[in-house]
């Protein structure tokens, strides 16, 4: 337990020392059509980006992305935001991702992270977990879990980023 | 064993020629800022004695699993470590997780298509049928490699990976050495004449070899065991098909009772989808495909390959934790079909907001095999017909889910399933002991969401399981209140009301309360948890019954 506290202290102090600069790491994935995709290609011409980790077996994940799907057209029109939905389904469910995404008619860009390489680099413990990226490619906000209505506060943040404001 | 050595030379050559450029990468990366991030997770529980549910006594009273990952990146360079602590491991985790340490650390760099990792790494080739090194922290599952990995991307759709190392075994390493190489070609990227072809083709192949000393006094065991596989993915418009075939040389092990029969596996999956409709059909044949870097190991230890079940991964408690199915690596034939579609909104059948319908069915059989009595000669064990289901059925499941938003405040989701699990194969045991035969069950779920205000919601789940076998009928009620974005509280009761043994007709009440803020999540749980299976990502762990207070803290930074 003493060691654990030590590690956490060292970690937290190193973060304080280096500041919160954080960008998207480079990880090779495949997109939903099976093409290779490096995460450095997650771009949106200076407009906000939402990266959302989800899985076909995760109910809150699907609830979140289905709820956002209802208002996604408005979000895109008003802010230019793009959503990258990163599925962490492994070989068991990965073949079912595209039929599901098309079946429920999502318009997100969907990526497959079958061996959790991107998830690990992003420090995601559980899904759903989302990250907001600003116009400079910096990760400025993250949120774990999903509760009904979370998209309200999330969208307030996306609007701020679209206006070039800094998040508190 | 000359062939694999020659194959491994290729990535080594790339590695050497590119090392010359490393100096440039260092200079370029010097301009990039240093970024440090990671995550932290601790699960702890204070255990109460509860003889009613046969909860094991915990002498320590309090147990804890925790870890923290720290990753530092600067341009093309990355280094990371994970500290893990089990003082002592929670009930249900392998007690070999004992104490604390740094079982995971690595250093890596990328340079013009070349990527090198020294230390620990995770990797998967194709569908993982022959090679998958991965982690499921919640299940205490981690077969990370410790060694060297080199990846090279030629940039024209051709990629190679080569690796050598040993696998993690709790706080130590396994006996065997694993050597593996994989190559993949995207034909549309590799040949300019194929660039705009409507047919998209991706082919790949790999070779895996493990080495473990033969220390068996009775048998002459192969010290080097090779395995190879080929895969192909083809897409044309809205259709796609993917397949992988794997062959494993003779690999006598505790899993296959030391027979010298080679193993083979085939997985095929076809999909068609367009907006509003998607279908996937899959089939697989697995014959003697248990593959570990230590032939004497069991459970989930030191597995080299990954053989997930070809069944739906259910999310509702009674469907997910009582009778799930896991692949039988010694042999099975399985099929699955999955359909997802949407009924249009603003129609009489789809309702105002549309309706989502998910239909899924799966079935698994044993092999169509004949026993060969040759234990004193070549020890082949049996012969099996390729892709021919045997007489013994292991599992079946058919289920339907309908989801509809009724109005701005109400959403409903209903699920019905009918399933059978052959408990002579799966051998689940509860309070009544292990039932010796086929267990048939019907499960129904109604999930209602009531949005009180935009950020306040109440959700209720009513679940029922009816069965004439094993522990009989179950009912579950879940009530959950959430106040976005920070607070949640939930209560659940599981009641085994139909148990044929009267004293086992038990209630399992459990309450949780928690707070979420950004990347932090803190939750408290209190109550009874039944013995059963805890599954994440298709792999399950048996959890003993427990009663007590648990505290869980998660942070991502």
Image (cartoon, coloured by chain):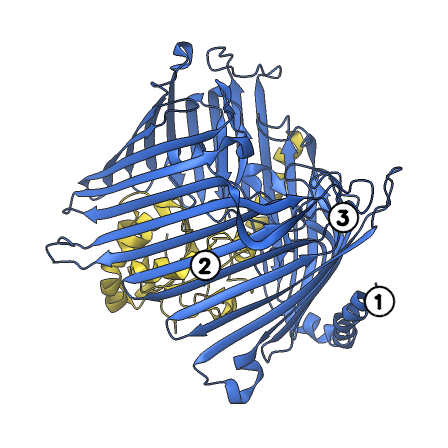
Chain colours: A yellow, B blue
- Give the vertical position of B91 relative to B221 (above or below): above
Quadrant of the image occupied by residue A164: bottom left
Chain-order first, disc 3 or disc 1: 1
Callout 3: helix, strand or loop? loop
Of labels 3 and 2, the one closer to you: 3
Q: Report, in whole angstroms, how far the alpha carbon at label 3 lies from the one at label 2.
A: 33 Å
The chain under label 3 reads B
Counting labels gives 3
Give the labeled residue for mark 2.
Answer: A95
- Which residue: 49% across, 72% down? B234
**Disc number at residue B260?**
3
In screen coordinates, is B329 left or right of A90? right
Q: Report, in whole angstroms, how far the alpha carbon at label 1 lies from the one at label 2.
A: 36 Å
Residue B481 % position (x, y): 28, 33
Residue A97 % position (x, y): 41, 58
Residue B518 % position (x, y): 41, 46
Q: Are the two marked residues, 1 and 2, in contact with CB atoms closer than 8 angstroms?
A: no
- Give the vertical position of B299 relative to B543 (above or below): below
Q: Are the two marked residues, 3 and 2, in contact with CB atoms closer than 8 angstroms?
A: no
Give the labeled residue for mark 1.
Answer: B2
In screen coordinates, is B56 left or right of B524? right
- Which residue: 89% across, 37% down? B217
């Amino acid at each position: 337990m003493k060691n654990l506290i030590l590690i956490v202290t060292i970690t937290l102090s190193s973060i304080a020392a280096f500041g919160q600069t954080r960008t998207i790491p480079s990880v090779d994935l495949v997109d939903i059509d099976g093409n290779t995709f490096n995460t450095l290609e997650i771009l949106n011409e200076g407009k906000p980006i939402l990266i959302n980790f989800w899985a076909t077996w995760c109910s809150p994940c699907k609830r979140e992305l289905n709820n956002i799907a209802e208002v996604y057209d408005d979000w895109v029109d008003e802010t230019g935001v793009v959503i990258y939905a990163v599925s962490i389904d492994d070989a068991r469910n990965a073949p079912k991702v595209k039929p599901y995404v098309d079946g429920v008619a999502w318009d997100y860009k969907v990526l497959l992270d079958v061996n959790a390489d991107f998830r690990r680099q992003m420090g995601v413990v559980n899904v759903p977990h989302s990250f907001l990226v600003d116009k400079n490619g910096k990760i400025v906000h993250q949120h774990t879990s999903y509760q009904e209505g979370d998209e309200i506060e999330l969208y307030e943040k996306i609007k701020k980023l679209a206006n070039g404001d800094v998040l508190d | 064993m000359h062939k694999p050595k020659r194959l491994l030379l290729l990535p080594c050559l790339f590695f050497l020629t590119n090392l010359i450029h490393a100096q440039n990468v260092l200079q370029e990366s010097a301009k990039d800022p240093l970024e440090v991030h990671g995550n932290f997770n601790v699960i702890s529980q204070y255990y109460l004695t509860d003889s009613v549910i046969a909860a094991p006594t915990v002498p320590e009273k309090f147990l804890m699993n925790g870890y923290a990952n720290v990753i530092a990146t600067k341009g093309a360079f990355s280094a990371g470590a994970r500290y893990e602590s089990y003082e002592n491991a929670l009930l249900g985790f392998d007690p070999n997780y004992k104490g604390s340490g740094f079982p995971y650390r690595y250093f890596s760099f990328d340079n013009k298509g070349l990527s090198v990792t020294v230390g620990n790494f995770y990797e998967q080739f194709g569908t993982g049928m022959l090679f998958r090194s991965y982690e499921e922290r919640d299940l205490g599952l981690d077969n990370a490699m410790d060694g060297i990995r080199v990846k090279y991307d030629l940039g024209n759709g051709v990629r190679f990976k080569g690796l050598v190392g040993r696998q993690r075994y709790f706080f130590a390493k396994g006996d065997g050495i694993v050597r593996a190489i994989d190559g993949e070609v995207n034909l549309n990227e590799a040949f300019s004449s194929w660039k705009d072809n409507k047919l998209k083709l991706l082919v790949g192949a790999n070779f895996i070899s493990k080495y473990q000393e033969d220390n068996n006094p009775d048998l002459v065991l192969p010290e080097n065991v090779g395995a190879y596989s080929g895969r192909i993915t083809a897409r044309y418009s809205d259709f796609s098909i993917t397949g992988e075939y794997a062959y494993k040389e003779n690999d006598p092990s505790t899993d296959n009772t030391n027979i010298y029969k080679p193993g083979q596996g085939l997985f095929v999956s076809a999909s068609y989808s367009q907006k509003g409709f998607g279908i996937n059909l899959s089939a697989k044949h697995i014959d003697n495909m248990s593959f570990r870097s230590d032939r004497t190991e069991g459970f989930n230890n030191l597995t080299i390959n990954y053989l997930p079940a070809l069944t739906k991964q259910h999310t509702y408690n009674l469907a997910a934790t009582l009778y799930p199915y896991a692949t039988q690596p010694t042999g099975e034939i399985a099929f699955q079909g999955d359909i997802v579609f949407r009924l249009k909104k603003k129609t009489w059948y789809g309702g105002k907001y549309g309706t989502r319908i998910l239909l899924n069915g799966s079935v698994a059989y044993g092999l169509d095999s004949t026993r060969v009595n040759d234990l004193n000669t070549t020890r082949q064990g049996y012969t099996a017909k390729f892709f021919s289901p045997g007489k013994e059925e292991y599992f079946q499941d058919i289920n339907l889910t309908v989801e509809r938003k009724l109005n701005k405040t109400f959403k409903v989701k209903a699920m019905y399933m009918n399933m059978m699990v052959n408990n002579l194969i799966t051998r689940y045991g509860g309070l009544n002991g292990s039932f010796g035969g086929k267990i048939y069950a019907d499960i129904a779920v109604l999930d209602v969401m009531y949005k009180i205000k935009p950020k306040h919601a109440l959700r209720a789940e009513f679940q029922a399981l009816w069965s004439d076998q094993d522990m009989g009928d179950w009912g579950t009620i879940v009530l959950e209140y959430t106040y976005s974005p920070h607070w949640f509280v939930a209560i659940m009761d599981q009641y085994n009301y139909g148990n044929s043994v009267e004293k086992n007709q038990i209630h399992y009440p459990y309450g949780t309360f928690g707070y979420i803020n950004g990347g932090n999540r803190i939750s408290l749980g209190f109550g009874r948890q039944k013995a059963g299976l805890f599954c994440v990502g298709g792999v399950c762990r048996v959890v003993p019954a427990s009663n007590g207070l648990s505290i869980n803290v998660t942070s991502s930074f």
